[in-house]
């Protein structure tokens, strides 16, 4: 098996790979954004709101990741 790695191959992603990267980047932005919002609320003495943000994030991110991965697998044209 002869695999050639080129700059053109790296810069032009297939739609499946681009959706996978989009899924991971989107979840990362959601996790970092919720952590920043939680920290901001906790520093402004809105501790109850910060705790709720942490609780929602702790519950929502695993479901979003699982749902996103299921969506990614079901829409994979190679299957």
Image (tube, rainbow, N blue to C red):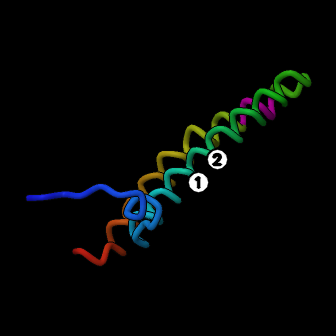
Label 1 CA crowd tier, 10 Å (few <14, some 14–19, many 20+): few
- Which x, y percent locates residue 22? 53, 59
Considering every residue shown, the one lying at the far right of the view is 44
Q: CA distance from mark 2 to mark 1?
A: 6 Å
CB atoms at circles 2 and 1 under 8 Å apart? yes
Q: Tell me if 73 is positioned left or right of 56 in this view.
A: left
Q: Secondary structure at mark 2?
A: helix
Residue drawn 71% across and 41% down?
33
Please give the label number shown on residue 30: 2
Please give the label number shown on residue 26: 1
**Picture quadrant where residue 58 is located:** top right
| 79 in relation to 66, above or below | below
Q: Tell me if 59 is positioned left or right of 42 in this view.
A: left
- Which x, y percent locates residue 79? 22, 74
Please give the label number shown on residue 55: none
Considering every residue shown, the one lying at the far left of the view is 1
Residue situated in front as seen by the camera: 48 or 78: 78
Q: Secondary structure at mark 1?
A: helix
Q: Which residues are magenta?
A: 48-52
Residue situated in front as seen by the camera: 52 or 20: 20
- Which x, y percent locates residue 20? 43, 60
């Amino acid at each position: 098996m002869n695999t050639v790695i080129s700059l053109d191959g790296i810069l032009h992603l297939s739609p499946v790979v681009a959706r996978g990267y989009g899924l991971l980047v989107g979840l990362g932005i959601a996790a970092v954004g919720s952590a920043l919002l939680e920290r901001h609320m906790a520093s402004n003495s809105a501790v109850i709101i910060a705790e709720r943000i942490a609780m929602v994030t702790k519950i929502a991110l695993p479901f979003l990741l699982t749902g996103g991965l299921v969506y990614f697998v079901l829409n994979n044209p190679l299957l």
